[in-house]
Amino acid sequence: MIAALAFMIAATQPIKLAIAPWTGKSLPTATTAAAKYRLLVTGEPNATIHLQAQGVANGWIAAFCTDTVCAPMSVSATLPSSGRAVYQFELIRESDDAARASGATITAGDTTLKVPASRP
């Protein structure tokens, strides 16, 4: 009975997002001219997640990066059995006449996270 209840609670676990400055070595797929963050996504193990960046300034692009790919503006993935995934989230200034800084809002279903305005 307790195991069934624990499974039901885990099965309804909402997606949680947390952001911090990126520390350590950049991923091989990342660009050097970007504001970089560590984006932690937690949720139900093996759940499909859909992350989207909104509110990025004109002339900027957001990217969700792993060690194999950087996905511009949105990404869909399956959480591993740990229920945790880490992305290198980047805000990249693509145009010289773009605003000097940009923030973003990351959404995952009903969950939102504000990324503070940064410059590369």
Image (cartoon, rainbow, N blue to C red):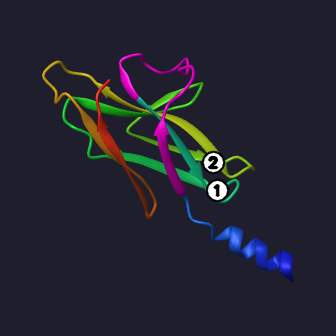
Q: Secondary structure at mark 2?
A: strand
First reached walking from the N terminus: tag 2 or tag 1: 1
Q: Which mark is residue 47?
A: 1
Which residue is depicted at the point 55% across and 22% down? 27
The quadrant the N terminus occupies is: bottom right
- Tell me residue 18's x, y (percent): 50, 49
Image: magenta residue range: 16-35
Mark 1: secondary structure = loop
Q: What's the residue at 66%, 60% (across, down)?
A: 44
Residue pictured at 16% horizontal, 27% vertical:
98
- Judge by depth and name the residue closer to the eye, 67 or 19: 19
Identity, as a three-letter code, of the amino acid under mark 1: Ala
Looking at the image, residue 13 sits to the left or right of residue 30; the answer is right
Compared across the picture, whether 81 is left or right of 15 comes to right
Give above or below for 73 relative to 2.
above
Label 2 crowd bin: few (<14), some (14–19), many (20+), radius 10 Å: some
Q: Amino acid at mark 2?
A: Thr
Q: Quadrant of the C terminus?
A: top left
- Magenta-span inclusion, residue 28: yes
Proximity of marks 2 and 1: CB atoms separated by less than 8 Å: yes
Label disc, if present, on residue 15 of the rendered structure: none
